[in-house]
Amino acid sequence: MVQTYKFSNAATDFYFNSSLKELGKIIDRKHTFFITDQHIFKAHEKKFKGLNTIVIPAGEEHKKQSTVDDIILKLIQSKADRKSVLVGVGGGVITDLTGYVASVYMRGIRFGFVPTTVLGLVDASIGGKNGIDVGVYKNMVGVIRQPSFILHDLALLQSLPQKEWQNGFAEVIKHACIKDAAMFKELEQHQLSDYQKNKTLLADLVRRNALIKIKVVQKDEFEKGDRRLLNFGHTIGHAIETQYALMHGEAVSIGMVYACDIAQQLKGFAGKERVRSLIAQYQLPTHINFDAAKVFEVLTMDKKRVQKEMNFVLLEKIGKGVVHPIPLKRLESIIKKLQ
Amino acid sequence: MVQTYKFSNAATDFYFNSSLKELGKIIDRKHTFFITDQHIFKAHEKKFKGLNTIVIPAGEEHKKQSTVDDIILKLIQSKADRKSVLVGVGGGVITDLTGYVASVYMRGIRFGFVPTTVLGLVDASIGGKNGIDVGVYKNMVGVIRQPSFILHDLALLQSLPQKEWQNGFAEVIKHACIKDAAMFKELEQHQLSDYQKNKTLLADLVRRNALIKIKVVQKDEFEKGDRRLLNFGHTIGHAIETQYALMHGEAVSIGMVYACDIAQQLKGFAGKERVRSLIAQYQLPTHINFDAAKVFEVLTMDKKRVQKEMNFVLLEKIGKGVVHPIPLKRLESIIKKLQ
């Protein structure tokens, strides 16, 4: 069943708990180009039979301009035109790249997503942010443009490595921290394996998280206010992710613990130990030894910096995130003491 | 005096017949980055003193991704952030590049233009289309996003080469052909040198042409209807421009003559000789020997192609352009007979 959510300039059709087989009803195969990575293509080769498919190397290190250039050349060679549709089948890297290419090819063609990771299902595919990294600077280039549709096929998670399950749960925990104390409790009462075994439990959690993200984006698509809450754990997270070759979820997990530490200092937040313990319960890291000077340097190039301040996301309590501007000088000294 | 024109998602402030000196009132120098090319920088070096300026090599051949990459790296190094503003000072290449970089840097920052060519003043800077070429394919990548402001300083035209004056008048003639029979007559009664000598005559013509473009774009920003008229002369024009190293205005001039020829065949258009003669009067070419097969091949990758048809712009009479879909097969045989 399709549910349509409107954003400021466009609407996205969500097919929750659906199946790849339903895609035929949504798009016209002939004018559709599928973009996926080598891992997914290999794991689901049969499903791509007879489809125009562009396969790129797997991994965040390929979320860069040269990959965009390659995809664009292939689209030109295949005579993709303004009526063509791109469908990204993959995790966040694939959906970010697909959305970006579709937004700039011929000044914008339609696109849709089939997320194949927990992270993609609950977070990365939703909200229209797309783009690429530039060197160590994450998502430095991109646009905000909504996909025409997002189709969920939870069966695709069967081939997902354990690491990637954990990775996705970092964003689930983030959503709980900033918006949903009840979900935080539910997570405390379960283990990752419960969700892996119980399809109904998982489908409910995925939809609940997608809805949290959808609602935040609907309220604030262009990130002037509430949407910034979704950056909880991401400011320090992004600054350490590339430098220490962490997975996104690992970096965000560590970033959330540090953000709780700062929230404790600046806001008297009392839930740091509960957050840390939930992160550990889902097999995610809570600490790293980092080079504070280097982290601060990368962090000053974060998009959330506005001149001499950083809009930092803190927690007032579990389930309630707040944006708190911190002067860079102050932030520098806080970060140096974090370790 | 500023005049504001609203587009679907944004408004552009137009400062007609103004001066670069007024810029200080519009932008905050400290957070502004000027993008210009070596020729303009050299011709007006004093005017860039004390400004953050990124200078790129001059020429359409630099309107490509690697130039975008270079500008983005410089913005990162200069710590440009979401409050930064880019100002393109130059012709169509500079404004197309500046608008594109600003649209994707940190998912979109503000930008404005100071056109330094007739083509830029009457056409290229207006309407929010921006982007880059990919190989021989013109404007294959880009977005539609409106500048915050456009400032006209006609004094900048003093250093404009004669070739570039002619180049700009191709678009003026185009506007007359598709939208303004009275202006067509005015042009017939003057020479290029009249406009070069008489500032009031020129200022009137520039504003009149800017308004033609503004109104067409306001009615149809995303090119579903009327905006396609602006492609008069551009379909064959684009296909020969890169291949025969023509200036844009030269290619469009030749393209307009061929389009008149096709209009005569398909629509009984009677004004072909008048158009050809006006183009020649403004020192622009009306013919080239081209490789029809190669031109047709490039043309099938034109963004105006939709599957098996091309939306071709023809004239019913002088001052009235119409969009006419032509099946590719038919177009191929027409083009082969054009020479």
Image (cartoon, coloured by chain):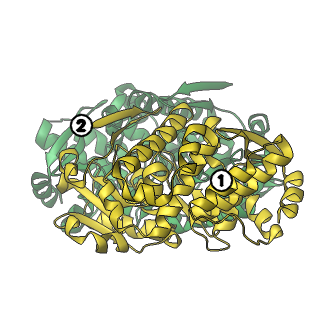
Chain colours: A yellow, B green
- Give the quadrant of residue B153: top right
The residue where tag 2 is placed is B323
Left or right: where does residue B171 sit relative to residue A78?
right
Please tell me how crowded label 1 is: few (under 14), some (14-19), or many (20+) other residues with Cα within 10 Å. Answer: few
Residue drawn at x 82%, y 55% as measured from the top left: B49
Which of labels 2 and 1 is toward the front? 2
- Relative horizontal placement of residue A106, taking residue A186 as reference (left or right): left
Tell me residue B22's x, y (percent): 76, 35
Looking at the picture, how far across and down is residue A201, in whole percent? 40, 47
| Residue nearest the observer in this picture, B255 or A135 | A135
| Quadrant of the rendering where the N terminus of chain B is positioned | top right
Locate residue B339: give its quadrant: bottom left
Secondary element at tag 2: strand
The foreground one among A14 and B294 is A14
Q: Chain of mark 1?
A: B
- The answer to whether any part of residue B319 appears in the image is yes
Residue reaching furthest to the front:
A189
Label 2 neighbour load within 10 Å: few <14, some 14-19, many 20+:
many
What's under tag 1, amino acid-wise? Ser
Q: Earlier in the sequence, mark 2 or mark 1?
A: 1
| Co-location on one chain, circles 2 and 1 | yes
Q: CA distance from mark 2 to mark 1?
A: 37 Å
Q: Is residue A124 left or right of residue B246?
A: right
Circle 2: residue type: Val
In the image, what residue occupies the spot 69% across and 33% down? B18
Disc 1, SS: helix
**Rendered image: mark on residue B159:** 1
The spot of residue A174 in percent (x, y) is: 60, 49
Parent chain of label 2: B
Residue A225 placement: quadrant: top right
The residue sitting at 64% across, 36% down in the picture is A224
Query: In the image, residue A93 lies at what x, y percent?
Result: 47, 62
